[in-house]
Amino acid sequence: MEGARLLDILLEERHHPTQIVLLTLNQPEVLNAFNSKLGRVLNANLERQWDDPTVRVLILAGDGDAFSIGDDVTERHTMNQSESVGCASPSQKVYRKLGTFPKPSLWAINGMVLDGGLEMTLSADFCYASTPAWQGFPEVSRGISPGVGGTQTVWRFTSRERALELLMTGQPISALEAYHDGLVNKVLES
């Protein structure tokens, strides 16, 4: 196994015999929120993995108490209006790339996965969650709707009624509920 630190915000481990790459979001102090720096680093890494014939499977995990809470809203507040309008969400770029990734992808969810973080998990081929994990779309409590693609994607995994409930109430659900709703493939004891 080889490991690399990519600006300390993304850790990469390569497991050569199995040709698996494990990427770990490494910003636990901000619950692995996506800022423009993490977005650039993760996008560049995904481009490298895309064409690498030694990579057969991609696993993405989050360090600390969260897989990811989505976009770093504090970064958005530091931008003026033209910067904010001209800047696509960092998680949006990653989401689009992962939605067309040519190799199997698996998300290992620990702790919280919210907002754009949850929307990104919907782009994975497989999604496994630990028992203390919980997830949700709390954007509605801030008067906005999910902006990375969750409003279009969540319908593929669960019933219309459950999708509406998740999107309109913002209430988080447990890993076990997510499994029963079809949002994760398996729940693992942590």
Image (spheres, rainbow, N blue to C red):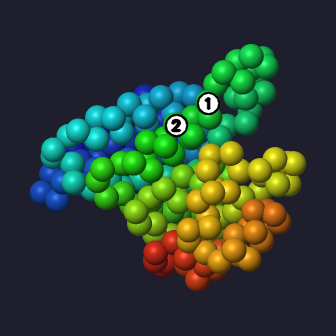
Amino acid under disc 2: Lys
Position of residue 162 relative to residue 17, above or below, is below
- The amino acid at mark 1 is Ala
Left or right of 1 in this view: 88:
right
Q: How many marks?
A: 2
Q: Nearer the viewer, residue 99 or 58?
A: 99
Q: Are marks 1 and 2 in contact (CB under 8 Å)?
A: yes
Closest to the observer, 48 or 69:
48
Label located before the other in sequence (1 or 2): 1
The picture quadrant where one finds residue 178 is bottom right
Crowding at dot 1, Cα within 10 Å, few <14 / some 14-19 / many 20+, comes out as: few
Res. 47 image quadrant: top left
Task: Identify the disc placed on residue 93.
Answer: 2
Q: Is residue 113 left or right of residue 41?
A: right
Q: Position of residue 172 (x, y in %)?
A: 73, 67
Please give left or right for residue 20 compared with residue 182 in the image.
Answer: left
Q: Residue furthest bottom?
A: 180
Query: Quick one: 129 or 115, which is closer to the camera?
Result: 115
What mark, if any, has residue 160 been given in the picture?
none
Please say whether residue 190 is visible from this viewpoint: no
- Residue at 20 percent across and 40 percent down: it is 52
The residue tagged 1 is 88
The residue shown at (43%, 42%) is 97
Give the residue at x 69% y 74%: 160
Residue 13 in percent (x, y) is at 29, 47
Q: State the separation of the CA atoms marked 1 and 2.
A: 7 Å
Please tell me whether residue 41 is drawn above or below residue 63 in the rendered image.
above
Density class for disc 2 (Cα within 10 Å; few <14, some 14-19, many ≥20) is some
Spot occupied by residue 9 in the image (x, y as percentages of width and height): 47, 36
**Residue 24 in picture, x, y percent from top left:** 42, 48
Residue 176, above or below 29: below
